[in-house]
Amino acid sequence: MIDIAGARDYFIDLQTRIVARLEAIDGNGFGHDAWERDGGGGISRIIEQGRVFERAGVNFSHVRGDRLPPSATAARPQLAGSAFEVMGVSLVLHPLNPYAPTVHMNVRMFVAQSAWWFGGGMDLTPYYGFEEDAIHFHESCRDALAPFGAEYHPRFKRWCDEYFFLRHRGEPRGIGGIFYDDLSDRSFDHCFALTRSVGDSFLSAYAPILLRRKDTPYGERERDFQAYRRGRYVEFNLVYDRGTLFGLQSGGRTEAILMSLPPVVKWRYAWRPEPGSAEARLYADFLVAKDWLQP
Amino acid sequence: MIDIAGARDYFIDLQTRIVARLEAIDGNGFGHDAWERDGGGGISRIIEQGRVFERAGVNFSHVRGDRLPPSATAARPQLAGSAFEVMGVSLVLHPLNPYAPTVHMNVRMFVAQSAWWFGGGMDLTPYYGFEEDAIHFHESCRDALAPFGAEYHPRFKRWCDEYFFLRHRGEPRGIGGIFYDDLSDRSFDHCFALTRSVGDSFLSAYAPILLRRKDTPYGERERDFQAYRRGRYVEFNLVYDRGTLFGLQSGGRTEAILMSLPPVVKWRYAWRPEPGSAEARLYADFLVAKDWLQP
């Protein structure tokens, strides 16, 4: 019933398809680092200083461990410490152009003892917000889940808003999307199909936004704001992100995991955007949990 | 016996003295932000884009809370959840010149129920290593503790090496110094005097190093390496540092706490210094736990 080989084939194929499309958009190739360690391994596909992507990684990994770390078992304390395997694709893309948003997508499958569960999601982090981009992204998320039941999208959308939130800043990381974990409420086939649908929807959710924004003229001001806002991305990933902490705790490959960190980041003390500026609009109109699909 | 008012006076005076000296070195004034919140407060003294300091903060805070957070109670689980107060001075200085090391110093006093304890230390994080700087810094640490008992320095030096270690990188944060926590092994007067000695030794430990390095000529290569290595500082402070996590959890002031993060940071995938280069020497000769005072 648990189709480990099928899941592995799917994840590897998904990585290949996504990278091929991103390479076509960038015009430059992604690196290909295959690695193995302690019964696990993966393929890191990374680009830095591309034409479109300043730093981007699309990673496949399949890790086995003797003791499931606490960061993976919030909902299943009885499995903490048992042998496990986890595989999936995780990507973060940091475009060079400040008008093009950073994006994150992850799909994964856990197996521990006789239990299995899926997790995944995608979320968008703009530096300059565009309503049509936000609506398109959230529509794509909704459409990916719709065939599997009407209840998933509202739940996974809310979960995303709750998860990608910087408590110490009182700020969401971006405009959200969907997030889910511990998915095993119906059959393996159902949950795997839902997860495939999320993975397969990534390119149609993100590529149109990237293509619309990647050549927008910008100057030092926009690059500076992008570098400043990227600091929030670092703060979230290192302080809160369970995926990052799990990876660092479970013998993942540090360089591949920290691929999610942006290439150039700035911190500035008590900085606030000028009222009424484009930068202020990001905070006022986009960095707020809202329902983008209800006008 | 517990002299809260005396400790408060000392910490505020220490902050004033340190800032005055750093302002004299930089030639520019530090900002002065006094803040109050929920029965606590502090004074944040910050400079950005100074002549010598690219970003530096010397913070005094005195925070009261209803529930001591877990990050503060590793050694005193029985106090978790009780009312507490903590006060102290914490500083991180990020010089502009890549040949001048980043430095951190903290001295603090906790009171919870009838218990009290002190913590503190200082540690140095060079981008380019100099043996004479390392020896001077470690001698200063040793001399600060010597009057209080010969056992403290070896113990606090080792504690520092263990504490400021990035497990996911297998690397120390810098060349160490001293670190201690839960100090209440002898009288309040003894422990307070030891902590004052650490605070009072900071300027003589660091200023000579800064003055020696701050005008060294450098180029883009050195700035780039500095920005790359600063990424490790961010990783340590956000993933491991109990002081940072405690501050963020206990209603500290986010902007003051995250003052420790560097102004400009770069991440690069799987980067390694060229063998034999000055950058490689940092890893080989300085980012290793060693006894700088035994030739």
Image (tube, coloured by chain):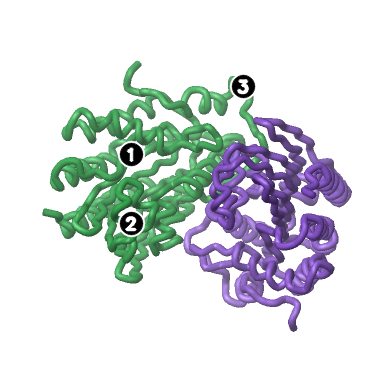
Chain colours: A green, B purple
Query: Whole-percent x and y of residue B13?
Result: 85, 45
Residue on which disc 1 sits: A179
Q: CA distance from mark 1 to mark 3?
A: 32 Å
Q: Secondary structure at mark 1?
A: strand
Is B143 located above or below residue B79 in the figure?
below
The residue pinned by badge 2 equals: A80
Closer to the chain start, of discs 1 and 3, is 1
Tell me which numbered mark, 2 or 3, is placed earlier along the sequence: 2
Q: Does A64 sit left or right of A28 as displayed?
A: left
| Residue type highlighted by circle 2 | Ala
Q: Is residue A21 visible?
A: no
Judge whether B231 appears above or below B142 on screen.
above
Mark 3 — on which chain does it sit? Answer: A
Q: State which mark lies toward you, 1 or 2.
A: 2
Q: Return the mark for residue A275.
A: 3
Query: Mark 2 or mark 1, which is nearer the start of the sequence?
Result: 2
Q: Is residue B216 left or right of residue B175?
A: right
Crowding at label 3, few (<14), some or many (≥20) Cα neighbours within 10 Å? few
Residue A224: image location, x then y, percent: 60, 39
**Residue B31: x %, y % from top left:** 78, 37
Protein chain holding label 2: A
Of circles 2 and 3, the one toward us is 2
Residue extending farthest to the top is A295
Could you tell me which secondary element the residue under label 2 belongs to? loop
Q: Quadrant of residue A132?
A: top left
